[in-house]
Image: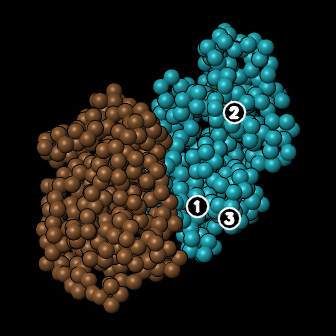
Chain colours: A cyan, B brown
Amino acid sequence: MANQTIRCIDHGQGGGLECLSIIQTAAPLPGAGEVRIRVAYAGVNRPDILQRSGKYPPPPGASPFMGLEVSGVINAVGDGVPASRIGEKVCALTPGGGYAEAVIAPAGHCMPIPEGLSLKQAACLPETMLTVWANLIERGQLRPGQSVLIHGGSSGIGTTAIQFARWAGAGQIFTTVGSEEKAAVCRGLGATRAIIYKTDDYLAVTQQETAGEGVHLILDMVGGDYLAKNLKALALEGRLVQIAFLQGSKVEMDWSLLMMKRLTFTGSTLRARSSEEKSRLCLSLQQAIWPELSQGRCLPLIYAEFDLTAVADAHRLMESSQHIGKIVLQVNPQLS
Amino acid sequence: MANQTIRCIDHGQGGGLECLSIIQTAAPLPGAGEVRIRVAYAGVNRPDILQRSGKYPPPPGASPFMGLEVSGVINAVGDGVPASRIGEKVCALTPGGGYAEAVIAPAGHCMPIPEGLSLKQAACLPETMLTVWANLIERGQLRPGQSVLIHGGSSGIGTTAIQFARWAGAGQIFTTVGSEEKAAVCRGLGATRAIIYKTDDYLAVTQQETAGEGVHLILDMVGGDYLAKNLKALALEGRLVQIAFLQGSKVEMDWSLLMMKRLTFTGSTLRARSSEEKSRLCLSLQQAIWPELSQGRCLPLIYAEFDLTAVADAHRLMESSQHIGKIVLQVNPQLS
């Protein structure tokens, strides 16, 4: 494959769906500590949309192409990685470039396919589950019995976060969604109360259902007007963990509540972390969640599957926010 | 004393210095778990100014009068407090009412006078040291070798925070001050670099002196325009701890850096905490810092002393921000 070319999705200078095209490019070569994965499936994530539109340039050294998670088979290794790993089926967090027939990933970012899961399911795990793990469990420090509010409950992140919150022993699990259909799915996954934000006010509902105490932890990807409202919805010593700002990160608001209620506002992105930090997160996630997956719990919810050549349809669906759970690209399904 | 009256500072409906007057009021009676302290000295704190001006009403159940810390002698006890404590010299965090000849405090908020310190020095400890302890050490989690930026370095809080940072083994200790005279005092207390904010930009200085890494922890009481600048000044995983918003808590700014650098923004006030929580803080502070005080380290810096009847002069000085360190009211100095 070293001299071969592969098919890969390019987004040129960035923009709307029209900027997407399939190109032939040289198969990438793994560097020291890296592997090359022949891709079976690639997960589609919200940051891909931002990257395509030119708003979220890849960090220095990363692939210029989209795609943050894949499943497939290792077919080449770089220095320091045993050749015996060739042929191993893995799912991996990639430094971009997952929308392709082959992609490079650090060996430490490859995880085994959980027992009983398909390559299609496994492709949906890394980016979403590592993000939820790092933010809801580690950074947000969700503790048994605590209440949590998960915004965007029907997204890939949301459906995973609801299941992780249940796994962590959360008390009340609130989530916000856009329709009754989505609410029903979230309740099925473990949400105590799915609030349809178009008709109900999440601040009023959470205040009422916590007897005025407020929620202990909020996982938010909305930002904008939600920021001030999230502070109001938090209990004393509550934490707000921000993983995206879909409604904007520039906000005018009063912060005195943060001090009066001793709140903590924090957040993180996965992509900006060091490679060592990502390897550590992969190990923590496997130890805690892989056994759950093999028991049929915390499974990824897959809403739609598209051929790699239909990537524009996949992005259109994600931008519509009509999906419930993950969207996945089929690249080489015959690897399964 | 039960049927006696005491002199006490009243601020009427609140406002400027003209609202201050000395009144006679009934000596307060200690409730269950409380003591009454005959006051020798009372510390003056920034929240007193806010309370006087009507911007910081006391929490429910607290004294309507000003004064958050005193030193003196216990002269009455409530149910559950041994009578043997009468006659004990203490310094105490009070739920207001310290600007008076006698004040009530929960027994758990009374601390012994550190060996070798005067009652005048001891009156300056509780509010300031508990605030710095709770925010710089506990909430801010300052670790040995980490860099810290302390705004308002010449205030009571600032002069204490610089000394606590040194005690905690901080690496670089940056502080902001308004004059070279104040800068010299802060350097004497342990500041690595005192930045005169009128001529130097603290963001530029801290970036340069940390080789672009930024500072690990910021203790801020300014707010306003400092908020966005503080985010820029922080290192990856840095923490901003807010203990007041002297320049305002309503701010328009972009929060994307919080997520990209995995920052934590938190803060607290001492007064809003539960009585149990304050008792716990008193114990932690004594264990860690009382031995230091008795060794002549971390001492409060006293800038000026006023008679209780000259409280308006004390407030005028604090509002001028010309002081360096603490301002204290002399109530019954003969108790020493």
Q: Earlier in the sequence, mark 2 or mark 3?
A: 3
On screen, residue B196 versus residue A250, left or right, reads: left
Residue at 50% across, 31% down: A58
In x, y percent, where is residue A327?
69, 44
Name the subunit of mark 1. A
Q: Is residue B316 left or right of residue A20?
A: left
Q: Which part of the image, by quadrant, shows the C terminus of chain B?
A: bottom left
In this view of the protein, which residue sits in the foreground, B238 or A174?
A: B238
N-terminal label among 1 and 2: 1
Mark 3: few, some, or many residues within 10 Å (few <14, many ≥20)?
Answer: many
Q: Are marks 1 and 2 on the same chain?
A: yes
- Mark 2 → mark 3, Cα distance in angstroms: 28 Å
Looking at the rendered structure, whether the residues under marks 2 and 3 are on a common chain is answered as: yes
Q: Nearer the viewer, residue B151 or B248?
A: B151
Dot 3: chain letter: A
Give, as a three-letter code, the residue at label 2: Leu
Please name the residue that numbered disc 3 is placed on: A172
Q: Which comes before the other along the chain, label 3 or label 1?
A: 3
Q: Secondary structure at mark 3?
A: loop
Query: What label does residue B253 carry, if any?
Result: none
Residue B180 is situated, as x and y percent measured from the top left of the image, at 13, 41
Name which residue type carries label 3: Gln
Q: From the image, which quarter does the N terminus of chain B lie in? A: bottom left
Q: Amino acid at mark 1?
A: His
Q: Residue at x 81, y 41 (%)?
A: A291
The residue at which mark 1 appears reads as: A216
Please name the residue that numbered disc 2 is placed on. A283
Instruction: Say which chain tag 2 marks.
Output: A
Rendered residue at 84%/30% (across/down): A336
